[in-house]
Image (cartoon, rainbow, N blue to C red):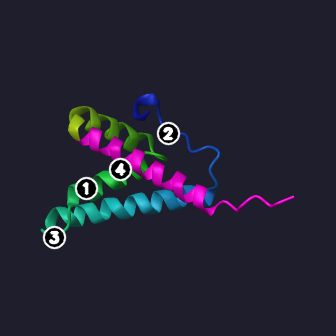
Amino acid sequence: RLQSGAPNGSGRSLAKRVGILVLGWFFIALGIVGLVLPFLQGVLFLLIGLAILSKESAVAHRWLVAFTTRHPKIDRQRRRAVAWFRAQRARFRKSTRPAPKPK
């Protein structure tokens, strides 16, 4: 799915798009700081920021595709993490649905 094409921000509200950009750049900045500080995992935060920004930025999307093509083991871990998060989100949504009203 990552290689299916450039991101498409249409259909998202302006607030959601701005939130995605702010969050992505926050993780990029944290990753840059983490490259210098020994107790932060800089590369991990850079990848998280890149993954978030790839939803809105075609450049970030291309970088993420190039990185995951070059490092397939990391891409497998990323895919497992995405599947886990989706399962958790589905489980949460299922648990928060209101019970059907009796007739």
Indicate left or right for 78 with 18 as reference.
Answer: left
Answer with mark 1 or mark 3, whichever residue precedes in sequence: 3
Q: Amino acid at mark 2?
A: Pro
Answer with mark 2 or mark 1, whichever residue precedes in sequence: 2
| Distance between mark 2 and mark 4 Cα atoms | 13 Å
Q: Name which residue lies at 35% across and 55% down.
A: 49
Observer-nearest of 33 and 88: 88
Q: Name which residue lies at 22% across and 67% down.
A: 33
Q: Which residue is mark 4?
A: 50
Q: Amino acid at mark 3?
A: Phe
Q: Which residue is mark 3?
A: 39
| Distance between mark 2 and mark 3 Cα atoms | 33 Å
Magenta-tinted stretch: 74-103
Is the residue marked by circle 4 packed among few (<14), some (14-19), or many (20+) residues within 10 Å? Answer: many
**Residue 78, position in %: x, y?**
32, 45
Answer with mark 2 or mark 3, whichever residue precedes in sequence: 2
| Distance between mark 4 and mark 3 Cα atoms | 21 Å
**Residue 40, position in %: x, y?**
20, 67
Question: Does 99 appear in magenta?
Answer: yes
Answer with mark 4 or mark 3, whichever residue precedes in sequence: 3
Is mark 4 in CB contact (under 8 Å) with mark 1? Answer: no
Q: In this rendering, is residue 80 above or below 18?
A: above
Q: Which residue is mark 2?
A: 7
